[in-house]
Amino acid sequence: MTTLALNSLRIGNGARLAALPVGILMLVMLMVVPIPAAMLDIFFIANITASIAILMVALNAEKPLDFSSFPTVLLLATLFRLALNVASTRVVLVHGHEGEAAAGHVIEAFGTFIIGGDYVVGLLVFSILVIINIVVVTKGAGRVSEVSARFTLDALPGKQMAIDADLNAGLITPDQAKARRVEVSTEADFYGSMDGASKFVKGDAIAALLILGINIIGGLILGMVSHGMAAGDAGRTYVMLAVGDALVAQVPALLLSIAAAAIVTRVSSSFDLAGQIGSQFSSPRTWVPVAAILTVLGVLPGMPHMVMLPAAAGAGFAAWRLAKRAAAPVPEAANDDAPPVDPSRIDWSEVSDHMQVNLEIGYGLVPLVDERVGAPLMQRITGVRRQLSKELGFVVPQVRVRDNIGIAPYTYRIVIGGVIAGEDQVSPDEMLALDTGQAVGTFQGKQARDPTFGLDAVWIAAGDADAATAAGYMVVDSGTVIATHLNHVLGQNAADLLGPDEVQSLLDGLKEKAAALVAALTPAPLSLTALTQVLRALLAENIPLKEFRRIVAAIAVVAQRTNDPDEIVELIRPELGALIIQRLCGPREPLRVMTLEGGLEALLGQTIRSDPSNRHAIEPDLGRRIVDALQHAAQPLIAQGKPFALVVQPMIRPAIRKLVRTCLPDTPVMSFTEVPDDKAVEVVAVVGAPEQIAA
């Protein structure tokens, strides 16, 4: 049965796909193949039916995109009507001399009953319909389509940024963001198509005028020359048929023009067009003035009292009914099926938070994320995530921004994995002037310290920003301060942002280009969990994952010898030495290094060899002295902004890295084996001489 259902579904889809080409071929056949008058009547009725159906769909749509196929439907309907015009013209000119019924009963009905058999009246009625169609409906709809298309395309970047902001804030899921992007793109395509489709309607109305003229002139010539009819008889017969044919085509054309105008002038609402108009005319304040004005006009001398006074009474009754309905209490919708709410129940969503990165802000900073003013902070956070993802080599998780009434109004807090990783205060209405060492003069304001670089700063008025910049200060707004601090904190805690899901995504991307390499690494000999630990250890030492293929190739070789993540990290570091060094100096620059004195390295190495499992091999007092000496030697290089590395023996590198991680977190600790043989080295300091340690 399932196979039969699938086959039926395939047949149904195939029939729908074949219906459109068959319909197009039929339109072409109507233009070139003669058809009898009876068949012509059927097609005329089908044309009117289709036009009414299209108009009803347009009126019942809640928003324009609910009828997104309208431009194509409008094209097909216009082609169908033009094909009928060609077919009816052939019938009128060939069989018109036989009488008014020769072109079919529909044309005869429009030519005799609707216009009373007077072709002059028919010409005037047709002219009025064409004027209404071209000058009023079609021209207005075309202008609205043009403006809507222009503004929709102009607003496209802003809508995309708003979607990214909501996604970064955690307000929507990735699937919802994808659906909204598709909707925005479809909206732009729709209004662009409508701008062109409105030209179809205008061209169709102009074509109706030309076809009417051709039918009248051709009919007169054929009637008098080919069939020997008198001029009066030929004019009466052929003009009547031509006018009837034109009216048959013009009525559906006017319906489609109204449908196009209704679509492009719609505003998105939860109601259809009738409900939207009714809801906006349902205020009693609208109808009370109407009733009063009609009453005044109705009692004036010379006015049609029997018409205007009943209309005033009707407007007054409508106002009374609407006011009574507005004053009536709205009954609450009872839901007998809904279970009773237990006030003692606590939902899991109240206590669980699945967002890895949160930015909590005080209520005074809420304007920074307000969409009505462009949400400047959200745009900067998106830029931070995008740039940091490129630098680290994996997609940084979303940052959810939410207000927290438990913190000070102008305080923000960066939380990673439930742990507060950064916190500071900003002034949203002022600018932060940073003293980078080249500033001259002082400014009035609140003294502060930059949360990212620790520079002396002052909060100044926005009007003093230009003067502060001229004085050598670096001036930034509060959103930039928060975004920069967030970027710094996320970079320092990159290892906490990488989980098994991110690692699996990296492996899936690499599998498309190097499937054998991935298969040689995981799930054997290295599990996904162990691989995640290795990669997190690399990130903890500021080694990005941009060259993921090279890193995986090195891990795959070492994983054949050991599965311990710490050992794997130490064994692959020599293969990654060039990646570490390129962040410190250019290819032609020497690598500035600090080293430990030989006697101190030998002492530390002996201590570690005596107890390899000791996690804190360095005696605390000695460790404090080493840290003080390293900070003293590194201070001139840090002040000059010159990056450097601390190079030690391979055995003691992990212990030294743990020792200096708190005082020099951005300084890489390398072993001698990690420095390429062809790399020039400049020793800037030797730390650990007896006199330095004693001091």
Image (cartoon, grey):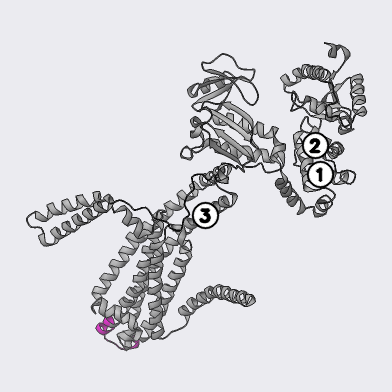
Tell me which secondary structure the magenta stretch mostly adopts.
helix
Residue ID for mark 2:
579
Q: Amino acid at mark 1?
A: Arg
Image coords of residue 621 (percent x, y): 82, 17
Q: Is residue 230 magenta?
A: yes
How many numbered marks, from 0 up? 3
Q: Amino acid at mark 3?
A: Glu
Counting residues from the start of the chain, the first of labels 1 and 2 encountered is 1
Crowd around label 2: few <14 · some 14–19 · many ≥20 (10 Å): some
Which element is circle 1 on?
Answer: helix
Residue ID for mark 1:
550
Crowd around label 1: few <14 · some 14–19 · many ≥20 (10 Å): some
Say which quarter of the image contains residue 216. Answer: bottom left
Up the image or down, 556 lies above or below 274; here it is above
Image coords of residue 556 (percent x, y): 85, 46
Say which quarter of the image contains residue 677. Answer: top right
Image coords of residue 324 (percent x, y): 24, 52
Say which quarter of the image contains residue 595. Answer: top right
Up the image or down, 247 lies above or below 334; here it is below
Residue 202 visible within the image: no
The residue segment tinted magenta is: 225-236
